[in-house]
Amino acid sequence: YEEMLTEGSVWECLGMPTDLRAQVWPLSIRMQGDTLVGNRLCKLLFSPELDRRMTVFEEGRKLYAVGEEGEPEVILDFGMQQGDFLDNGVGYVLDCCMEQNLGYRYPVITIDTGLDCTSLMSGDTAPWLYQLIEGIGVSKDEHLGHRLLSAESAVTFLQRCWKDGLLVYQSPWCKETSIRQPAAGTRSPCFDLQGRRFDTPPSKGIYIQNRR
């Protein structure tokens, strides 16, 4: 199981209001260190654009949000199997498979909700689906029992995910945003076996990048 909550993670997203008369806005969600809730070590998620924080932790292939009274609530379950129904009653697992993205392979759980209010309101015939991508997150939080960091009147759509400045996931429906990537948000340099540096991977031959 590949954990989602790793230090150096940045999720680049779009916020879309359910009232479509308002404007779509770019936002980011970032790891902001650890915090203790009772005897449990948790992580802090922070959106500088929204100035909002969320206390979360991972356990048993599930992501939990911790409320003000310290009670955990499951918001993402990466252990679901095909045919499982969601506890909140909104949808079931349509498919579990491996998908490739930017050269990485991820276990992906596809949820069929049967209804996509935002798409219907916008006249979009796109999907009633959303995906849980192991190690990355969720493609949108519209039908989660607990929104990630957006207000209840908005939906957060994942655009890209960065780990330690390396782009590791990009949504197939990714739209350009105005968010400026972190200073480290460029692909790490490469080196050949003679130690020569390249800013981009060479088209041929063996090279080393990120110690691999």
Image (tube, rainbow, N blue to C red):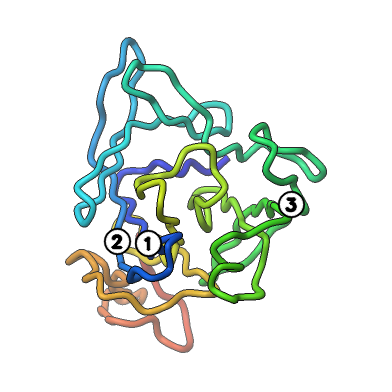
Category of crowding for the residue at label 1, using alpha-carbon neighbours closer than 10 angstroms: few (below 14), some (14–19), many (at least 20)? many
Q: Identify residue type, mark 3.
A: Cys
SS at mark 2 in the image: strand
Q: Residue furthest bottom?
A: 203
Q: Identify residue type, mark 1.
A: Gly
Task: Tell me if label 2 and label 1 are in contact, CB under 8 Å.
Answer: yes
Depicted 11 relative to depicted 39: above or below: below
Name the quadrant of the C terminus.
bottom left
- Expressed as whole percent of the image width and height from the top left, the position of residue 97 reads 73, 56
Asked where in the image residue 184 lies, by quadrant, the reply is: bottom left
- Expressed as whole percent of the image width and height from the top left, the position of residue 115 reads 68, 57
Q: How far separated are the C-alphas under marks 1 and 3?
A: 27 Å
- Expressed as whole percent of the image width and height from the top left, the position of residue 7 reads 31, 44
Q: Which mark is residue 34?
A: none
Q: How far separated are the C-alphas under marks 2 and 1?
A: 7 Å
Q: Earlier in the sequence, mark 1 or mark 3?
A: 1
Q: Identify residue type, mark 2.
A: Leu
Q: Earlier in the sequence, mark 2 or mark 3?
A: 2
- Is residue 166 found left or right of 77 in the rendered image? left
Q: Earlier in the sequence, mark 2 or mark 1?
A: 1
Front residue of 104/127: it is 127
Q: How far separated are the C-alphas under marks 2 and 3?
A: 29 Å
Q: Which residue is mark 2?
A: 27
